[in-house]
Image: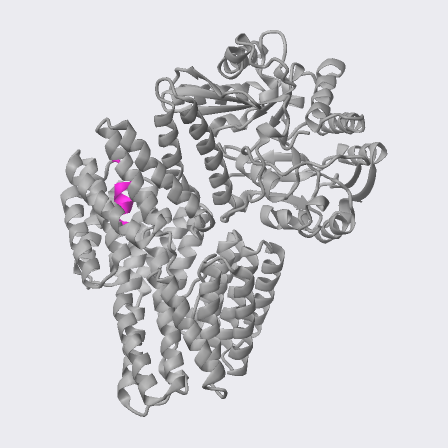
Amino acid sequence: MGFQIKQLRWLYISLSILSLCLAITITPTRASLPVPTTSTLNVSASTSQPTNWLEQGRNLYHSGRFAEAVTIWQTAAQQYHLQGDRQGEALSLSYLSLTQQELNQWQAAQQSIEQSLKLLQTSIPSADAILWAQALNTQANLQLHTGKAETALESWQQAQKFYEQAGDTMGSLGSQINQAQALQSLGFYRRSKQQLEVLTQKLGAMPDSEVKVSGLRSLGLALQIIGDSGKSQQILEQGLAIAQKIAAKPHLSSILISLGQTAVDLEDPESALNYFEQAQLLTTNPSDQLQARLAQFKLFLNYDKLEFVNPLAPQLLQQLRELPPSHTSLYAAINFVATLNHQSNSEQILPLKDLAQLMAVTVKSAQQIQDTQAEAHALNQWGQLYQRTQQLSEAQELTQKSLNIARQLQANDIIAQSAWQVGQLYKQQGDRSKAITAYTEAVNALKALRGDLVAINPDVQFSFRTSVEPVYRELVDLLLENQPSQAELIQARELIESLQIAELDNFFREACLDKTQQIDRVDPTATVIYPIILPDRLTVILSKAGQPLRSYVTHKSQAEIEQTLDNFLVALNPVSDSKNRDRLSQQIYGWLIRPEEAEQAFIDTKTLVFVLDGRLRNIPIAALFDGKQYLIEKYAVALSPGLQLMATRSQNHISAVVGGISESRAGFSALPAVESEVKQISKAVSSRVLLNQEFTSQALAERVKSSSAGIVHLATHGQFSSRLEDTFLLTWDGQVNVKELSELLKNRGSDPSKAIELLVLSACDTAAGDDRAVLGLAGLAVKSGARSTIATLWPVKDRAAAMLMTRFYDQLRQPKITKAEALRQAQISLIRQTDFHEPFFWSGFVLIGNWI
């Protein structure tokens, strides 16, 4: 099977070249497609020449020389046409489309596959089933890449039938794995997982063979994509055991490399290194050997093991210099240099002039094999090397060349990277206006790529933080310099909004927020507050309906701000010194609230809505203290991942689906107060209850689907994390990951009037030590389709939680009360009427989304 290269290579450039030359893989936007030998097809050989061209094209494709493969397959198609061999022509056109997709020539690829299918439909009524299967597979791959996931699913289903007619088991399994990817693109994660589980059983029942090994590896990689790294590891280990048993040597190294990547994802560097070393020893081809060595190099760099990096780097440099030009070798060199460009101390590893020389050769090689995208990437990395040595004019020239090529190709991935670099160079030269223009082009390119800001790599979060987030932040920093104009404040606010959405897209590995509404137009009695942490200051932007934006600045370093926030979080523990807690709380209050209060900016404001940035997301805003009162005693407080919200509907009759676990389960401790919490809520509002054994994922799905209840209240263990894999909710039958949970909660169809009004997650927790854990909480809040979500930032004493939630529902039944005000009144009652007056017990409850 041929590997489909992901368009956004630069997003996970730090992974070296591992994802560039695997034999079989699936990605969310481009899927696996077999390129069999011509001997498996009934292709006419009336002359040997066209058949030889097909074989040449196949060899060129596998060696990554795509431009040459295009030429060969175009010639083959023409020759078959002249000979009247429609079957050979259709096959050549199918291969041609596949290769044009590799070169991002989408229009040409569309024309080629349409021609191929037209020939099969009109001229070859008795065409081999395998020919139909391959053409449909090529078409589906193109459809998925161009955003037509539903059509792609249908095409792969048809392809599967033809593969089965042809007796091609591997082709059938590959099509089914691809269908699982299409289901994920459509948001059907549970269906996708069920399909992959069925495939696991099918493969398990097959006799041991190379086909079975290939299928297991492909399945393992597909499971890795959906975040099930543990299951992926099991499947890959099964494939490895069979490969060793039947001595399938060509498969061993690629499976070992995949297992190494899974171990990296599971944060097990020792196992990862062991797999990579085994792969290097067992490999039967130079490509796998290079992959294994580059994987080790990246791992050593990530863990600062310079004693291993330093001897390996010159060996890799020499190996890369000696490789003949091909798509794979170009990207191997580009990613090697890019990995070192991310290291501040890389000149201690290799001289920068040696890396610049490698990029110069790579640019020439890219021109030689007509790989224009690789040329643009290489120019960009070359420019970065000059930028690092402060040779700014040379850096500008190379990066501008990269940007010009990217514009001609309309390659937004490269535009984003190169325009960002041009912006940095202008900024270094003190030209603020040109820097802002270049940065804006980079951000616009990132927005255009939104649906593609997805990757299968375990380092996707790291790549986002180094290749996407800084573009937004550096532009915001430029816009908010000195005394920003109203237009600059508006643009800065919009950028912070876009960054929040991009973070959520990255968390889910797909674009996830579509229907939007400006929240400052939802409620005229609300003020929206954007605190933005910049390297040398904290800027707060205030937005109120019908008024100009305001901004306030506190000059503190980012390190000092973040340290204060961390200290405050620690001080919230009830056993901590309350005077120290109040001091820290007042300090943060002084940054975010006091300047605006002094200017009476909150007159007529009932609700403060915070769009929080960075480390600020982890602190309970409601607990900020002015010296006399907590913020929640003065205003209702809500959080929003951004300005975008779905409109709310009126709650005339409140009803709920209530589920929970009070007993110890799956290694999690018992939550004895959950039983009374569930009973109290069911008294306060009309409820359908699922408790303990009844609270299974299937029962919850059925109850949500069949009920018209506006509220879903889940009192059970759960965890929020910045890692998709570590964000889950506990049901009686196991953990439900956030993607499956969001699909389950949206189980009422697409009618907005049936959306969940309020999702309450009681007893959940944010992942310890994860400074971006609230991403998982915000992600679920947005992705579930619920208009509002209430959850806890940390595990709250279950008796306090039960008390607060009961009082919240009592308030919510009052006429014309907003959700934010109902939560505020419940929190105030704990402060003033119970023993749970410490902020630890009540401030961890946060309302995300629409507060009305």
- The boundaries of the magenta stretch are 335-344
Find residue 711 and report its horizontal and vertical position in percent: 74, 39
| Residue 410 in view | yes
Q: Is residue 523 left or right of residue 138?
A: right
Q: Is residue 9 left or right of residue 145?
A: left
Vertically, is 544 above or below 47? above
Find residue 123 and report its horizontal and vertical position in percent: 45, 86
Vertically, is 161 above or below 409? below
User: Residue 278 falls in which quadrant of the image?
Assistant: bottom left
Q: Residue furthest front?
A: 546
Find residue 152 and report its horizontal and vertical position in percent: 52, 65
User: Residue 800 falls in which quadrant of the image?
Assistant: top right
Q: Could you say which is closer to the camera, residue 91 or residue 63? A: 91
Image point 72% across, 46% down: which residue?
754
Find residue 812 and report its horizontal and vertical position in percent: 77, 28
Q: Is residue 159 left or right of residue 244?
A: right
